[in-house]
Image (cartoon, helix red, strand yellow):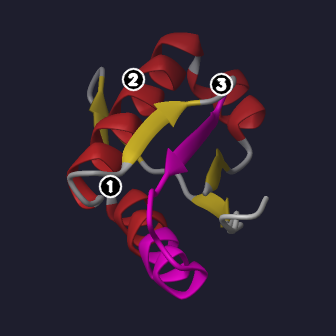
Amino acid sequence: MICDVDHFKKFNDTHGHQAGDEVLRSVGKTMSQVVKANDIPCRYGGEEFALVMPNTKISQARLAAERVRKAIEELTINFEGKSLNVTASMGVAEITTNE
């Protein structure tokens, strides 16, 4: 799964890079809390995250992506007296044993 925080550049421009850094920490922590124990969440790029889900079928990956997306959407980040919210977009793909 690939996860991208929506409109992150605009968020940074509006709230500042320190607020953006706090958002990235919070998104990463939230991902770690809502995935299965054997899944591997990691930061992939600037505001992108990846989730490697070994032995997971695409139908299960879609459910996991929605669970992560919803948890991020419901997340409130308190930073310097402000309550900040972000959303994220997800994409999933499956690699078969022959690939």
Task: Please check the rendered image and state whether residue 86 is part of the magenta-colored stretch, yes or no.
Answer: no
Crowdedness near tag 1: few (<14), some (14–19) or many (≥20) residues, C-alpha within 10 Å = some
Q: Residue at x 57, y 25 (%)?
A: 15
On the image, the x and y values in percent for residue 1 come to: 61, 57
Marking on residue 43: none
On the image, the x and y values in percent for residue 60 come to: 46, 82
Q: Is residue 32 above or below residue 89?
A: above
Q: Amino acid at mark 1?
A: Leu
Q: Amino acid at mark 3?
A: Asn
Location of residue 12 (image quadrant): top right
Give the mark nearest the N terminus, 2 or 1: 2
State how far apart marks 2 and 1 are (Cα): 12 Å
Q: Amino acid at mark 2?
A: Glu
- Mark 2 touching mark 3, by CB under 8 A? no
Mark closer to the observer (3, 1): 1
Q: Nearer the viewer, residue 99 or 77?
A: 99
Task: Please check the rendered image and state whether residue 51 is part of the magenta-colored stretch, yes or no.
Answer: yes
Marking on residue 75: 1
State how far apart marks 3 and 1 are (Cα): 17 Å
